[in-house]
Amino acid sequence: MKIIPLKEGNFSTNKTKDFTLLTDENKDLIKGIKMSVTPFLIITENDVILLDAGIGWKNENGETVISEILSKENINPNQVTKVLLSHLHKDHIETVITRNGNGFEATFPNAEIYIQKRELDFAMENQGNHSFDFDTLEKLIELDNIVWMDEDQGQITDEISFEVVGGHTPFMQVFWIKENNETVFYGADNLPQESYLKYHLAYKSDFDGKKAMELRVKWQKEAIENHWKVLLYHDLDKSILEF
């Protein structure tokens, strides 16, 4: 199994969820919550899997950072077979679509896109919530290759399992990818940074902070016992924790 962090950068975000790229020049001047945005590409013998899809940040040439990294890794977007979305906040879905002169198209045309249906329902009931980009979301759900999920847990393949756990959002789902003797765990925004394991806090930014905190305690114990690799979507410095 190969794990490729697709880090778009470190950002500061404000109350209206606007993202500002942090640079050496501005990082000490900009206020707000600081976080990375790091989707992950997992390559197994059977699949090329994208775990969440970032904010669509572009480099100086107008190319998305994710596309730039994939190109450096000699991976074509056509090779991606599955896109697994933990939840539908705008910093987790943007690069699933590509806007063009004719409207938009699927960035990963051969990939099945796995979306929790109840998470979509929650998003649509919260029009005006700054955490969602409804223009992107409405385009995303028009794509042909969506797999709508409505079970609480299960297997996507023999290698990929999921569970709807709530916490950060009511129906956020997490994923395990297992191949040979290796287990990768993605807890998304319930476990976005290493510091969340050091300080057992219920965060007000979560829909149910107490539940997210309890899940982290449980996962940390399991990660130690089973030697998981834990993927950190929002950690400024570290993308993967190995237990």
Image (spheres, helix red, strand yellow):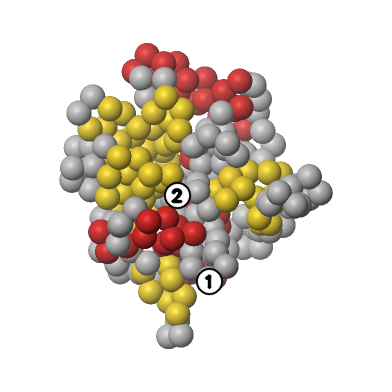
- Does 197 appear above or below 96? above
Q: Residue 62 shows which numbered tag?
A: 1
Q: Quadrant of residue 182?
A: top left
- Does 147 appear above or below 209? below
Q: Which residue is mark 2?
A: 6
The kind of secondary structure element at disc 1 is loop
Give x and y (percent) for residue 125. Answer: 57, 58
Crowding around mark 1 (Cα neighbors within 10 Å: few <14, some 14 to 19, many 20+) is: few
Residue 111 visible in image:
no
| Residue at the limit of the structure toward the bottom, as seen here | 102
Q: CA distance from mark 1 to mark 2?
A: 17 Å
Give x and y (percent) for residue 170. Answer: 52, 42
Q: Which residue is at a point 32% across and 62% down the rendered structure image?
A: 77
Kindly check if marks 1 and 2 are in contact, taking CB atoms under 8 A apart as contact.
no
Q: Which residue is at a point 37% across and 24% down the rendered structure image?
A: 228
The kind of secondary structure element at disc 2 is loop
Give x and y (percent) for residue 90. Answer: 55, 57
Q: Which residue is at a point 26% across and 55% down the rendered structure image?
A: 81
